[in-house]
């Protein structure tokens, strides 16, 4: 049993080519064997027939020997009686033919018993022929002829006895031959029968063997191929494979590959399912964005938690409904279609506007619709991401209101300054105008009146300067300073200012030196305002330098800034007073006020102007004298407050 | 400086309209002009009556305040320009206490020929007035054909 199973196993594991070879070769081998048998059988038959033919020939020759001798004896007797030579013809014929016949018989005879008879016949034949010769000799001998015929007669009788003996021997031999012939015929028949049977058996065995081999071969293959087919079908459906052929031949290997492919496929499917699951969870669980899908017509086909949270519908309530129900009345008729059309043509459409919740309340939404295409580029639907922007919109709105209020406040302030300017200047126009008229016609006035007019004009001009500076400071602080920043060349500006103030400085009895830059020194500032600051600083230097000899104006590059300095060799500023230098109305040297013009706002105004242009202004005390400096940015500052120099 | 081209008397004979809601300013400007010798001075403190006066008087020069109640100087500038479409050089000198660049630009853009901030120098304003009138007279001569 185990041997058989092992054999089956061995056969099943052979390659298909070998199996095919065996299936074709087996019937062929059987057929070949049958042919060999057939050939052998026919040879045996031929041999048997040959034996029969020989036996017949032996019989015929034996009869002929007998016949020849009998005729020769008859002829010799006739010759002996008549002396007629024509009676000797049979004798001579026998003499001529007998040796050949006898030799033929000698060659043909195989059977020992027959050979025994033949030898005796041969002896008898020799004796007969000798006998006949003697008779013929006697007959030819006239002596014998004339004598008593008894000699011849004796010879004839003896001869007759020999012939009888021979006949007797021939009969025995013939009988033996007949038996042999009978035996041989039977053997021929036997061989023929056996041959027939063998042929039939061979044919049957060949046929059955072929059928069996083909059956085994084909059923094995077909059965297993069917199995494979069924498994392939299962594979295609993604189901588990059933029992697989395990044989080591090609089909078996194919089956094993199929099994491996199935395992791989299932692994991948599993991974894909897991990734899909993760993705689905992400989409579904996102709470801040409403993410859902629309089909080509705009019907909702999926819904996530965010969408439910933002819009209020649960998935079951909204799936299958058209997404236009998210839109308020005023846009529902056109906007949904427009959005889909835009997404269709441009790939994506974005919109910000009012949308409806389930309870009918509105929220401000940011909506992005993206067209979804399959691999063939066919539109499959849309993905829609909605975000509730109400909170941001509210803060934006608040910001906008605040900004508008600030602008309004700034405008109001500007308006106020403008009006104040007007209200203060208008009376000043009358005061100074009429004062000037009086001054022009001073001949008509007495000295006291003239002095009064002069005082009015002086006070009036001071008041006007004060008003101008105050309004300037206010307008800068209101953010309404009308700065016209541009690229200006400070070297050029310095020369201009030098020329402008030189008379004032000389009038104070001071030297006015200028240290300009070698090449153009560009700053980003309002030319008019820079001049204003420089004039203020230089005139301050001239005003307060009562003891020194000079005022120096210089400028140089300093990193991303340009630095301007105004220096004098006067008494300088007491260190305790330095912190108050740039404070409005904190004019130093109040005790000398009567001798020094000015509003007390110059440095405060300069500080505000320089800072509003992105620069810095300051004071430092050299060994003796005073030094005021300010910086201006080379390029427009990125922010209002530029970096320090 | 310009006396050689146009006689002082011809300039002083020209009609001048002063529009200012402040009585004091009207008085000041009138005083300056009278002192210079101008004799054809018309004034109004009511800006709503200014256009009517402008049309009635057909001044050779208008001294116009900008900041006035009800109808401001800018509106009047526009009204004058509309009315004056065909006529040529009829100068308007704007006087204002508004020193902002914006006001200055707006007035000049609306056709004002000169702009003076209040308070002003009385000598300077007299010279500017004379200059504007002289330009007007020369323009008229030009239009009338070769003298």
Image: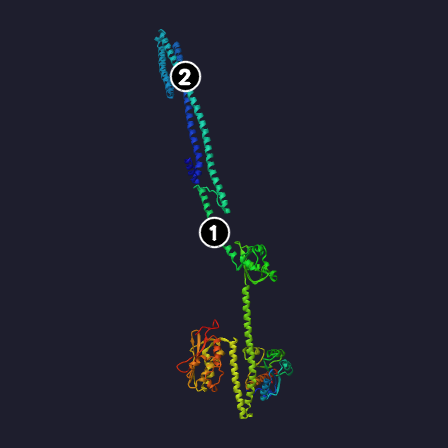
Q: Quote the CA–CA distance across marks 2 and 1.
A: 103 Å
Mark linked to residue A175: 2
Q: Are marks 2 and 1 in contact (CB under 8 Å)?
A: no
Judge the density around disc 2: few (<14), some (14-19), many (≥20) Cα neighbours within 10 Å: some
Q: Please state the horizontal and vertical placement of residue A364, each as a whole percent of the image.
A: 56, 63
Q: List x then y, in percent, for residue A266.
A: 47, 48
From the top left corner, tell me how far across and down residue A508 is, in percent: 45, 86
> Which of labels 2 and 1 is toward the front?
1
Counting residues from the N terminus, which is met first, the one under dot 2 or under dot 1? 2
Asked whether residue A531 appears in the rendered view, the answer is no
Q: Chain of mark 1?
A: A
| Quarter of the view holding residue A156 | top left
Residue A592 higher or lower than A65, as above or below: below
Say which quadrant the N terminus of chain A sits in.
top left
**B130 vs A478, nearest the viewer:** A478
Looking at the rendered structure, the secondary structure element under dot 2 is helix
**Label 1 packing within 10 angstroms: few (<14), some (14-19), many (20+):** few
Q: Which mark is residue A259?
A: none
The reply to whether label 2 and label 1 mark residues of one chain is yes
Q: Tell which of B63 and A214 is nearer to you.
A: B63
Residue B71 appears in which quarter of the rendering?
A: bottom right
- SS of the residue at dot 1? helix
Q: From what the image shows, is residue A264 above or below residue A423?
A: above
Quadrant position of the C terminus of chain A in the picture: bottom left
Q: Is residue A626 above or below residue A250?
A: below
> Which of the 4 image quadrants contains residue A19?
top left
Extreme bottom residue here?
A: A446
Can residue A643 be seen?
yes
Total marks shown come to: 2
Q: In the rendered image, which residue does mark 1 sit on?
A: A271
Taking the spot 49% from the left edge, 41% from the top edge, the residue there is A226
């Amino acid at each position: 049993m185990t041997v058989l199973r092992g054999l089956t196993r061995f056969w099943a594991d052979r390659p298909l080519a070998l199996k095919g070879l065996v299936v074709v070769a087996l019937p062929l081998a059987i057929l070949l064997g049958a042919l060999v048998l057939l050939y052998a059988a026919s040879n045996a038959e031929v041999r048997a027939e040959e034996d029969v033919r020989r036996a017949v020939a032996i019989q015929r020759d034996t009869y002929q020997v007998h016949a020849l001798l009998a005729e020769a004896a008859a002829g010799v007797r006739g010759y002996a009686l008549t002396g007629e030579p024509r009676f000797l013809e049979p004798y001579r014929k026998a003499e001529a033919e007998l040796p050949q016949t006898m030799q033929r018989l000698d060659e043909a005879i195989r059977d020992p018993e027959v050979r025994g008879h033949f030898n005796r016949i041969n002896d008898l034949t020799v004796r007969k022929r000798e006998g006949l010769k003697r008779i013929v000799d006697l007959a030819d001998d006239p002596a014998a002829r004339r004598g008593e015929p008894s000699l011849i007669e004796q010879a004839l009788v003896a001869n007759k006895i020999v012939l009888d003996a021979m006949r007797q021997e021939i009969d025995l031999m013939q009988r033996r031959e007949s038996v042999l012939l009978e035996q041989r015929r039977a053997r021929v028949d036997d061989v023929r029968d056996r041959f027939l049977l063998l042929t039939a058996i061979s044919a049957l065995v060949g046929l059955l063997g072929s059928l069996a081999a083909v059956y085994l071969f084909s059923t094995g293959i077909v059965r297993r191929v069917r199995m494979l087919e069924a498994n392939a079908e299962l594979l295609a459906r993604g189901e588990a494979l059933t029992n697989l052929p395990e044989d080591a031949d090609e089909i078996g290997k194919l089956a094993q590959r199929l099994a491996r492919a199935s395992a791989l496929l299932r692994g991948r499917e599993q991974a894909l399912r897991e990734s899909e699951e993760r993705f689905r969870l992400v989409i579904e669980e996102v709470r801040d964005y409403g993410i859902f899908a629309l089909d080509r017509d705009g019907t909702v086909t999926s819904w996530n938690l965010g969408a439910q949270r933002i819009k209020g519908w649960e998935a079951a309530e909204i799936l299958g409904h058209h997404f236009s129900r998210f839109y308020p009345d005023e846009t529902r008729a056109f906007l949904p279609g427009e959005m889909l059309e835009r997404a269709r043509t441009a790939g994506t459409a974005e919109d910000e506007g009012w949308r409806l919740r389930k309870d009918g309340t509105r929220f401000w939404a940011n909506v992005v619709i993206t067209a979804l295409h399959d691999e063939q580029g066919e539109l499959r639907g849309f993905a829609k991401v909605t975000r509730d922007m109400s909170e941001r919109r509210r803060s934006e709105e608040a910001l906008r209101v605040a900004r508008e209020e600030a602008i309004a406040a700034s405008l109001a302030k500007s308006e106020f300054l403008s009006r104040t300017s007007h209200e203060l200047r208008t009376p000043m126009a009358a005061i100074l105008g009429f004062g000037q008229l009086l001054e022009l016609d001073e001949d008509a006035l007495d000295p006291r009146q003239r002095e009064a007019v002069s005082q009015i004009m002086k006070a009036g001009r001071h008041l006007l300067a004060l008003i101008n500076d105050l309004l300037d400071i206010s307008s800068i602080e209101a953010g309404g300073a009308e700065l016209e920043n541009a690229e200006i060349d400070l070297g050029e500006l310095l020369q201009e200012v030098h020329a402008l103030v030189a008379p004032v400085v000389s009038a104070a009895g001071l030297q006015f030196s200028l240290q300009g830059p070698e090449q153009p020194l560009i700053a980003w500032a309002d030319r008019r305002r820079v001049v204003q600051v420089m004039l203020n600083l230089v005139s301050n230097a001239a005003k307060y330098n009562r003891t020194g000899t000079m005022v120096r104006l210089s400028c140089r590059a300093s990193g991303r800034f340009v630095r301007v300095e105004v220096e004098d060799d006067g008494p300088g500023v007491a260190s305790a007073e330095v912190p108050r230098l740039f404070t409005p109305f904190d004019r130093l040297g109040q005790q000398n006020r009567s001798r020094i013009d000015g509003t007390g706002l110059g440095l405060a105004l300069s500080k505000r102007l320089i800072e509003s242009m992105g620069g810095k202004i300051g004071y430092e005390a050299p060994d003796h004298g005073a030094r005021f400096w300010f910086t201006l940015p080379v390029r427009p500052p990125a922010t209002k407050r530029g970096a320090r120099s | 400086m310009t006396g050689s081209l146009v006689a002082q008397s011809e300039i002083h004979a020209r009609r001048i309209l002063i529009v200012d809601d402040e009585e004091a300013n009207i008085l000041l400007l009138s005083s300056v002009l009278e002192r210079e010798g101008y004799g054809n001075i018309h004034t109004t403190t009511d800006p709503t009556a200014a256009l009517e006066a402008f049309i009635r008087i057909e001044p050779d020069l208008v001294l116009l305040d900008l900041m006035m109640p009800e109808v401001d100087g800018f509106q009047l500038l526009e009204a004058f320009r509309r009315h004056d479409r065909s006529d040529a050089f009829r100068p308007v000198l704007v006087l204002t206490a508004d020193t902002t660049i914006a006001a200055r630009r707006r007035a000049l853009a609306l056709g004002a020929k000169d702009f003076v901030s209040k308070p002003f120098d009385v000598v300077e304003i007299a010279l500017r007035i004379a200059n504007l009138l002289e330009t007007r007279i020369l323009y008229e001569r030009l239009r009338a054909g070769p003298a």
